[in-house]
Amino acid sequence: MSEADREWMEALMRPSSAISAGSFIVGVWMAFLTIINIAFGAYSSGRRVNWIDFLTNGDETNSVHEIGMSFPDDILFGILSSLLIAAGVMGMGSAREDGFSGWFSGLPRNRVFTSLFSTNDGLGRTFSSWMIVSGAAYYLIWSTLESTWVDPGVYSVMISFVMVGVGLNWVQDAKLDN
């Protein structure tokens, strides 16, 4: 393998901060859904999600059960969320000199967060940061009011807002690099 190929392969296999942060955030969200499903039922009040059927489009995606842990659904979903959290923490530790704790403690000083209350980094960044907050708030408020946490329509709206905000933030970062 040539030196250029080896460098390319190493760059490809090196974890990135963005993917590690995404893995951590999705893992925390899945752990939250697991707890909600065990305690209250994530499909609707008193109705639990059967995660395996839900993710594979099986016949029985929701059911009325006694609230509590269901093997293997909740255990497997909890394990998967733990693996994503661990991958995010380990990836951030490899991608940054200050590791996961440096990333986490630096969040309040991150441009995405500081631009929520200031236009110093530009109106585009402020707008994009508010798109992220609006999407997350919509999901949390709607899900709390309706007692359902796995509505595909709500996910569609939330993901649209959040990903447009993330994308616009990346555009603002690219402008800074030039």
Image (tube, rainbow, N blue to C red):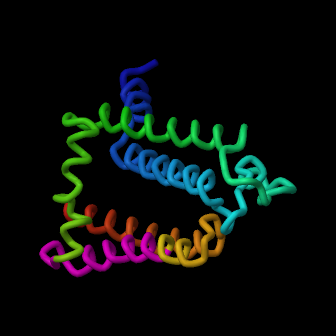
Q: Quadrant of the C terminus?
A: bottom left
Q: Position of residue 153 (x, y in %)?
A: 64, 75
Q: Residue lying farthest front?
A: 66
Q: Quadrant of residue 108?
A: bottom left
Q: Position of residue 31 (x, y in %)?
A: 52, 48
Q: Residue lying farthest right?
A: 59
Q: Nearer the viewer, residue 23 or 75?
A: 75
Q: Residue lying farthest top?
A: 1
Q: Position of residue 65 (x, y in %)?
A: 77, 55
Q: Nearer the viewer, residue 156 or 9?
A: 156
Please name the residue shown 62% across and 55% down the image: 37
The answer to whether any part of residue 93 appears in the image is yes
Q: State yes or no: residue 123 in magenta.
A: yes
Q: Nearer the viewer, residue 4 or 37?
A: 37
Task: Name the side, left or right, on which 40 lies relative to 139.
Answer: right
Q: Quadrant of residue 75?
A: top right
Task: Name the side, left or right, on which 85 lies relative to 36.
Answer: left
Q: Which residues are magenta?
A: 118-138
Please name the residue shown 24% across and 66% down the image: 113
